[in-house]
Amino acid sequence: MNNRKLFGTDGIRGIANKHPMTPEISLKLGKSITSFLKNHISHSPKILIGKDTRLSGYIFEQAISAGITSMGGEVILVGPLPTPAIAFLTSNMRADAGIVISASHNPYQDNGIKIFDRNGFKLPDDIESEIEKLILDDINSLEGIPSEIGKAKRIDDAIGRYIVFLKNTFPSDLTLDGLKIVIDCANGAAYKVAPIVFEELGADVTTIGAKPDGKNINVDCGSLNPQILIDKVLEIGADIGIALDGDADRVIFCDENGSEVDGDKIIAISATDMIENNTLKSDIVVATQMSNIALEKYLNDKGIKLERTNVGDRYVVEAMKKNGSNLGGEKSGHLIYLDHTTTGDGLLASLQLLSIMKKNNKPLSRLAEIIELFPQTLNNIKVLEKKPFKNITGLSDLVSKFENELNTSGRINLRYSGTEQLARVMVEGEDEVKINRIADDISSFIQESIGEN
């Protein structure tokens, strides 16, 4: 259970202009991360800042930049770019840290702040806790030296650097010639870069969700709302549909028949390709508690262990680094190919999948037959507090009863969202009617105990 006041499972997140997503907290964060870095390096910190297309991004970009420069740090501003682009550029430009201003798949009213280290990895919990302590407890002691004020500059070639990086992850002996692709950019951070990447590799690209106005990010589009993408794929007879979220670190696909293909199936497809090419390391794939049992059984049958982590792509990455794995991800579409990148990257994952389609000369519908997923249902309950589930009287007994009913043919997972005031109830099993009933009964119990009226 996360007891921190600012940082959740993916940085700081909330409604823009309400605590903790205020200009004041952002200014303090800029000062705190600069102070933290100065205690660990011998030079003036260089920090790269990117954002998605939310209107409130201007607020936080300027506030964080002011905090950094007031403490003598140097700021590099790259504007709207995908979260994984910031991870790549932080390392590529030898910055000491990278900051992304984005609330990912959340509505435009929200915003968030994620931090990468100099190697492009998200900060671990202990370092985030140190920075949080500086923000909340020690900030009054953080005063910059008047003669050592830093500076900020914008760079214009960041998008080009990222495009070259992405194209270099695609096999040099292949092109996308002959493929018709629909890409939904969610009116978010990838609206410029995504079409260019696929077009330059030879695809016939139709782009939707690429007209951001500051308020339409993720609205009826993107990875959480794939119906418009599916309709367009069927309308024009495309070979594949690609739906990104607002900061393009996750992706959901649809095949040429309009059937959705989620992260679990992509992990299975990728793992099989890597096994066949002897490139899967450690015989371990990492996923979260939300990944389908069918994926685990499929990998086990091939002699591959599925290691599960808490929800959040940074926890997946941490486990991958620990056990030497190079493939991991989430059902929701965060896919990590650690040989190429340090975080979930929707565009890179798309290129990996497209390369498998081209190498095997198979449509996505054929590749997606690799596993048949167990029925899975997920309910979200708005809660007044994130009370430990074990402390909700009667809930453990109810869950135990249903686990006995499912036996070995299903499972139950309860967790709180790390970014929203929600309890999530996931039930999975062979019998869809049964799992829906169980999920609804548990959800009703939580609603009556701690739910909003």
Image (tube, helix red, strand yellow):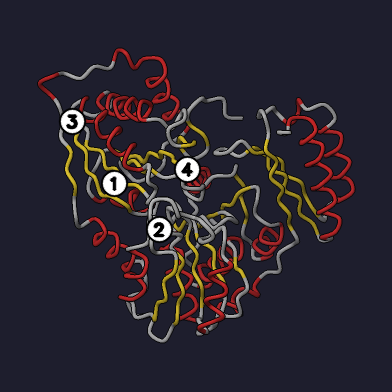
Q: Is 27 drawn above or below residue 162 in the view shown?
A: above
Q: Are marks 3 and 2 in contact (CB under 8 Å)?
A: no
Mark 3, Cα crowd under 10 Å, few <14 / some 14-19 / many 20+, is some
Q: In what element is the residue under mark 1?
A: helix
Q: Which residue is mark 4?
A: 109
Q: Is 112 drawn above or below residue 81 in the view shown?
A: above
Q: Nearer the viewer, mark 3 or mark 2?
A: 3
Q: Nearer the viewer, mark 2 or mark 1?
A: 1
Q: Is residue 156 left or right of residue 127?
A: left
**Mark sitting on residue 79:** none
Q: Is residue 142 left or right of residue 406?
A: left
Query: Disc 1 marks which amino acid?
Result: Thr
Q: Which residue is mark 2?
A: 339
Q: Position of residue 44 (x, y in %)?
A: 18, 30
Q: Is 277 drawn above or below residue 334 in the view shown?
A: below
Q: Which residue is mark 1?
A: 90
Residue lying at the far left of the rendered structure: 147
